Image: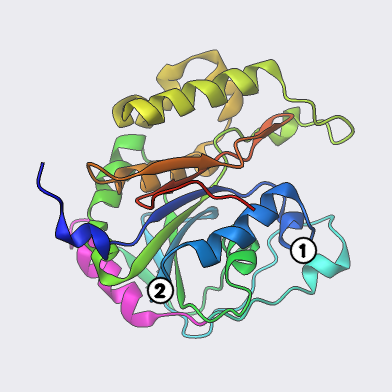
Amino acid sequence: MTADPAATSRMPVLFIGHGSPMNAIEDTPWSRQWKALGPALPRPRAILCVSAHWETPGPWLTGNAAPPTIHDFGGFPQALFDVRWPAPGDPALAQRVVDLLGTDIAARIDPDRGLDHGVWSVLMPMYPAADVPVVQLGIDSRRPGAWHVALARRLAPLREEGVMVVASGDIVHNLRRFDWRDPTPLPWALRFRDRVNALILDGDLDALADWPALGEDAALAIPTPEHYIPLLYALALARQGDALSFFNDDVQGSLSMTSLVIGHPGTVRA
């Protein structure tokens, strides 16, 4: 097979299981991996982040040149609310995404929206200087998985344009079943993590996109789809021959931290 010359300049794609926003300010096994990841990857000119925490009626994009830090949670220490991660926005990138998605998708730009914790809690450890422009893409969680896969594939040219796509969510995310006193992995959460990992390695994106068909474990792991859908964006942007590595492949109770690097050789180590 002839090597793809564009692959040497193609940006990788990430899926990051973000877990608790406290990972942004605490020294945890997962945040240590994020800190190691930033310097290990090619430096992007900009980042497009697909976060579980911005659900929109159709795809929306942040068009703010100086997006504020959104603290979209409650019940955490004041230190977390004091966090500011002043990464610049990139209105030109937002418009580029609108153009790539096309008139039939009719994406919209929100000139005022900031960056939620699904974005900054993982990007702040990776880029503590906040010197990489970031645009966030909202997800329409009412849509089926195949719709998201098709939309994500329209974004493929961004990888050759110096833009790194970072998808932020959790493959297993059921907070109602989470016991904060005992984070022992629940059997069904481990089974679903293992099944999804196997489907990822098999490249079976069709099965992953049809998560309701994956049975009872899927229903427990994905009671609502907003944390799972970002995974589909990352996988849809993979190219034939892309390296793929897992990291933070842990389950805490009913929450998974499993994360992926696509299109960059090697495994992330802290």
Q: Is residue 207 above or below residue 236?
A: above
Q: Is residue 73 left or right of residue 18?
A: right
Tell me the element at label 1.
Answer: loop
The residue drawn where x is 53% and y is 81% is 131
Residue 202 position, x and y percent, is: 34, 25
- Residue 142 visible in image: no
The residue drawn where x is 50% and y is 46% is 267
The residue drawn where x is 74% and y is 29% is 253
Residue 53 position, x and y percent, is: 57, 54
Report the disc number at residue 217: none
Residue 96 position, x and y percent, is: 26, 73
Label 2 to label 1: alpha-carbon separation: 23 Å
Kindly identify the amino acid type of the residue bearing the numbered disc 2.
Answer: Ala
Few, some or many residues within 10 Å of mark 1 (<14, 14–19, 20+): some
Occupied quadrant, residue 155: bottom left
Residue nearest the viewer, comparing 1 with 217: 1
Q: How is the rendered protein coloured? A: rainbow
Q: Main secondary structure of the magenta part?
A: helix
Q: Is residue 87 above or below residue 152?
A: below
Q: Which residues are magenta?
A: 88-105
Name the residue tied to disc 2: 46
The count of marks equals 2
N-term-proximal mark, 2 vs 1:
1
Q: Is residue 31 inside the magenta stretch?
A: no
Judged from this view, the residue extending furthest toward the bottom is 65
Kindly identify the amino acid type of the residue bearing the numbered disc 1.
Answer: Ile
- Residue 133 visible in image: yes
Few, some or many residues within 10 Å of mark 2 (<14, 14–19, 20+): many
Name the residue tied to disc 1: 25
